[in-house]
Amino acid sequence: MGRVQDKVVIVTGAASGLGEADARLLATEGATVIMTDINAEAGEKIAAEIGATFFTQDVSDETGWKDLMTMVEKEFGRLDALVNNAGIAVIADIENTSTAVWRRTMGIHLDGTFWGCQSAIELMKKSGGGSIINMSSTAALVGIPSYLAYSAAKGGIRAMTKAIAIHCKQQKYHIRCNSIHPGSISTPMVHHALKTLVGVDITKQADSEKTRREMGIGEPNDVAYMVVYLVSEESKHVTGTEMVIDNGDTAV
């Protein structure tokens, strides 16, 4: 308890999946959490449960980022950490990815992460430093044919993270920037992929937890624990890294 006590943390895409798990665990560990998502109904419900603040946000909208940071500075006076978690994953290979899907994927992942990092740095500089955590994927390391746009976007986040980390170190901002690369984690996004690509509806199995373990699929908190570590002072010497959480899948 209290590993991130009183730290002011923004988590995007926090109304479900990994973002929800991150927000819940950060709150449990003492953080002041600002949750954002386009799903206001679910986001507000979770925020009320964990004592967080909810802000409706489409991360692909630059103006929304400015409004969010203005609110955070006014209400909380500083920003200690940002978790750029919001994302989508449309199943489509190179031959079937539409321009609309490509642009929407890049807008959420790359534009959203860019604007998030840029605006967070501006506020963190006033606060004396902070931690930026960008949610990437093992798709950035190996490429997944059926997720062409997603793989490309996550690869961009990986490279962007390193460039930001080096810049902040050179400028002596005391701002760290790291990426997390989950493999298959039990979230609605992965459940949809399993059902669509391999015909397994994990939510309808007699023992869904047993099926999850047998398939080598992780739990959302496997990622959330890493988020807490990177927000905390325990990781004060960690920047520019890529934290892979995939039970060794990409090590083979």
Image (spheres, rainbow, N blue to C red):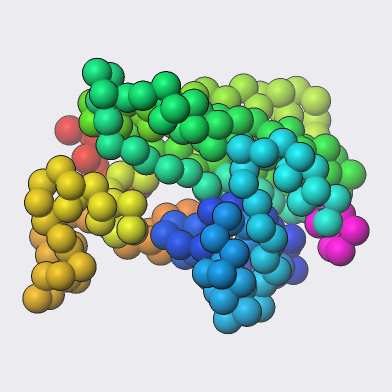
Q: Residue at x 72, y 36 (%)?
A: 62
Q: Main secondary structure of the magenta part?
A: helix
Q: Residue at x 71, y 23 (%)?
A: 167
Q: Quarter of the image containing the C terminus?
A: top left
Residue 173, given in percent of the width and then of the height, sits at: 80, 34
Asked if residue 157 shows in the view, the reply is no
Q: What residue span does the magenta drawing correspond to?
A: 72-78
Residue 75, magenta (yes or no)? yes
Which quadrant would residue 32 be assigned to in this image?
Answer: bottom right
Q: Quarter of the image containing the N terminus?
A: bottom right
Q: In the image, is 235 to the left or to the right of 247?
A: right
Q: Residue at x 11, y 60 (%)?
A: 214
Asked if residue 187 shows in the view, the reply is yes
Residue 117, given in percent of the width and then of the height, sits at: 68, 36
Image vertical order of residue 206 relative to residue 109, above or below? below
Q: In the image, is 202 to the left or to the right of 243?
A: left
Residue 189, given in percent of the width and then of the height, sits at: 33, 52
Residue 135, given in percent of the width and then of the height, sits at: 49, 43
